[in-house]
């Protein structure tokens, strides 16, 4: 956008009453006549009788649980602010998970405040930017004026949609500065709120709030499970899209795969839930390969790790490793089938009452057995596992919680997560892999440059588990048949 189109008034500053003609060459001048013209002639577009968003039925219970955990304390949960990319251009905004979880809202600058109503109980309010004032010129002269960024909901509309009283966020920082009593804030999202609270909060107490909100998300409610299934279903379609254009990726690069999946994510959802890993050939051995600028070659494998994030901000996290030309070579199949067997053992260990570590241990056991069987490690298997020798090629943990964040519940205490017990409603990935680096001289040459991961999204149910991503094939034979069908 050219400088000529940049609004003159800095963010949140009220435009001056007297409009002067152009002061310098950068910004347009505003005559009194133009200012007067922009004040009037606009229709009333207030929306009435809005239905609450689907999350509203669930966010009230989440706020009630939060209130019960921190009685008598003011709790401040910001959505976050726009981050500048350069000058007046910002990165795409994504509301903080904590704020969206508790309100269902996703607008920048929003802040949820739970105000204690006594020794127990809180009243909640969501603080938002209101509709732009047209009388004082804010509408078109402020960087956050609706003329520039689009219509916002009025505070009354927001109340109806969210089921929470809504107030003007521009008054919040001062109110928080003046407020008395204990307060906690979710840090890292809103520097204005943090400045206002700087003398009132401690790192330790704020961290307890963050930890609580991470652990509270471990068990998903029915709405969340439905959204996760939607995210996975879109992701399945995104993987199908990719298979259909593999010839175009061969003619260009891994970027064609990234772009193809992204199109599905943006059309059906909000975004991708994390940077897609489109790793062809030896790039599959780089765990966080997101440059995606390499060649896609017939005869190589493609490791695609990607997930659609829904409009409500739940993400899938799925990996398939596919032969670019539709058929595994013998060594590729050998490694793939070992990872599949490992994943089968891992998924079988996901059930209520099992320890979180069980599926990891089950998967790792199978991989260690295979590495010994192939002569890459000296047995016995128990010794290999005790010393962790398989990790040269297994590299990462076998899975993690999944939800609004791809690595969900990441601030949870060890006893509540890694050392914890699985419960119905938890959703996690099971994603074992084997990775033989291209320059690994300890394995025969035919293994080098092959990386395989298979990742599915598994919901813990009352009597075991459900694979949300069962819509994609997992065995090597089924992968080949599926690719043949899609490529026609
Ligand atoms: N896509 C990140 C992960 O699998 O954990
Ligand atoms: Mn993944
Ligand atoms: Mn994962």
Image (cartoon, grey):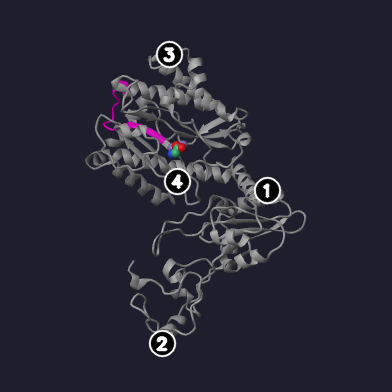
Q: CA distance from mark 3 to mark 4?
A: 40 Å
Q: Indicate which disc, 2 or 1, sits on the residue closer to the N terminus.
A: 2
6 lies above or below 488 = below
Q: CA distance from mark 3 to mark 1?
A: 52 Å
- Which residue is the site of mark 3? 378
Mark in the foreground, 3 or 2: 3
Q: CA distance from mark 4 to mark 2?
A: 48 Å
Q: Which residues are magenta?
A: 319-331
Disc 4 is placed on an element classified as loop
Q: CA distance from mark 2 to mark 1?
A: 55 Å
Q: CA distance from mark 3 to mark 2?
A: 86 Å
Can you tell which mark lies on residue 273? 4
Q: Nearer the viewer, residue 397 or 246?
A: 397
298 lies left or right of 411? left
Count neighbours of disc 3 (C-alpha within 10 A) and say few if under 14, some if 14 to 19, many if 20 or more: few
Q: Indicate which disc, 3 or 2, sits on the residue closer to the N terminus.
A: 2
Tell me whether the residue at label 2 lies in contact with that at label 1, contact meaning CB atoms closer than 8 angstroms: no
Viewport quadrant of the N terminus: bottom left
Q: Position of residue 450 (x, y in %)?
A: 33, 27
Viewport quadrant of the C terminus: top left
- Which residue is the site of mark 1? 65
Mark in the foreground, 3 or 4: 3
Q: Position of residue 57 (x, y in %)?
A: 61, 52
Q: Indicate which disc, 3 or 4, sits on the residue closer to the N terminus.
A: 4
| In the image, farthest residue toward the left | 251
- Magenta segment: does it hold 303? no
Count neighbours of disc 2 (C-alpha within 10 A) and say few if under 14, some if 14 to 19, many if 20 or more: few
Tell me whether the residue at label 3 lies in contact with that at label 2, contact meaning CB atoms closer than 8 angstroms: no
Q: CA distance from mark 1 to mark 4?
A: 27 Å
Seen at 36% across and 47% down, the residue is 262
Can you tell which mark lies on residue 33? 2
| In the image, farthest residue toward the front | 199
């Amino acid at each position: 956008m050219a400088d000529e189109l940049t609004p003159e008034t800095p963010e949140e500053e009220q435009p001056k009453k007297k409009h002067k003609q152009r002061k310098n060459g950068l910004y347009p001048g505003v005559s009194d006549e133009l200012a007067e013209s922009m004040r009037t002639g606009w229709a009333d577009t207030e929306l009435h009788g809005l239905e609450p968003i689907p999350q509203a039925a669930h966010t009230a219970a989440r706020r009630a649980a939060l209130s019960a955990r921190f009685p008598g304390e003011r709790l401040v949960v910001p959505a976050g602010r726009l981050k500048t990319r350069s000058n007046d251009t910002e990165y795409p905004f994504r509301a903080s998970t904590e704020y969206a979880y508790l309100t269902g809202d996703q607008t920048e600058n929003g802040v949820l405040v739970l105000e204690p109503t006594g020794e127990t109980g809180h009243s909640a309010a969501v603080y938002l930017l209101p509709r732009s004032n047209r009388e004082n010129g804010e509408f078109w002269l402020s960087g956050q004026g609706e003329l520039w960024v689009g219509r916002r909901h009025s505070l009354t509309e927001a109340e109806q949609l969210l089921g929470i009283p809504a107030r003007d966020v521009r008054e919040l920082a001062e109110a928080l500065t003046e407020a008395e009593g204990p307060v906690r804030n979710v840090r890292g999202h809103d520097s204005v709120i943090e400045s206002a609270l700087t003398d009132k909060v401690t790192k330790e107490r704020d961290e307890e709030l963050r930890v609580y909100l991470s652990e509270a998300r471990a068990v998903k409610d029915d709405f969340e499970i439905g959204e996760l299934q939607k995210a996975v279903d879109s992701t399945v379609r995104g993987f199908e899209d990719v298979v259909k254009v593999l010839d175009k990726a061969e003619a260009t690069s891994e970027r064609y795969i990234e772009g193809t999946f992204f199109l599905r994510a943006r059309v059906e959802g909000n975004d991708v839930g994390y940077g897609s890993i489109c790793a062809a050939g030896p790039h599959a051995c780089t765990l966080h390969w997101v440059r995606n600028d390499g060649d896609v070659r017939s005869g190589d494998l493609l490791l695609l790790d990607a997930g659609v994030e829904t409009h409500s901000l739940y993400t899938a996290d799925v990996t398939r490793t596919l032969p670019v030309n539709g058929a595994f070579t013998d060594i590729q199949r050998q490694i793939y089938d070992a990872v599949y067997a490992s994943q089968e053992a891992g998924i079988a260990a996901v059930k209520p009452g099992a320890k979180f570590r069980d599926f990891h241990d089950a998967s790792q056991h199978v991989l260690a057995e295979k590495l010994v069987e192939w002569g890459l490690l000296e047995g016995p298997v128990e010794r290999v596992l005790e010393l962790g020798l398989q990790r040269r090629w297994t590299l990462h943990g076998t899975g993690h919680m999944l939800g609004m964040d791809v690595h969900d519940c990441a601030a949870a205490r060890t006893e509540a997560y890694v050392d914890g017990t699985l419960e119905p409603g938890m959703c996690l990935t099971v994603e074992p892999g084997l990775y033989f680096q291209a320059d690994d001289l300890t394995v025969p040459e035919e293994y080098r440059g092959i990386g395989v991961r298979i990742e599915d999204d598994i919901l813990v149910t009352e009597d075991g588990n459900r694979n949300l991503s069962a819509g994609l094939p997992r065995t090597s034979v089924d992968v080949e048949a599926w690719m043949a069908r899609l490529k026609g």
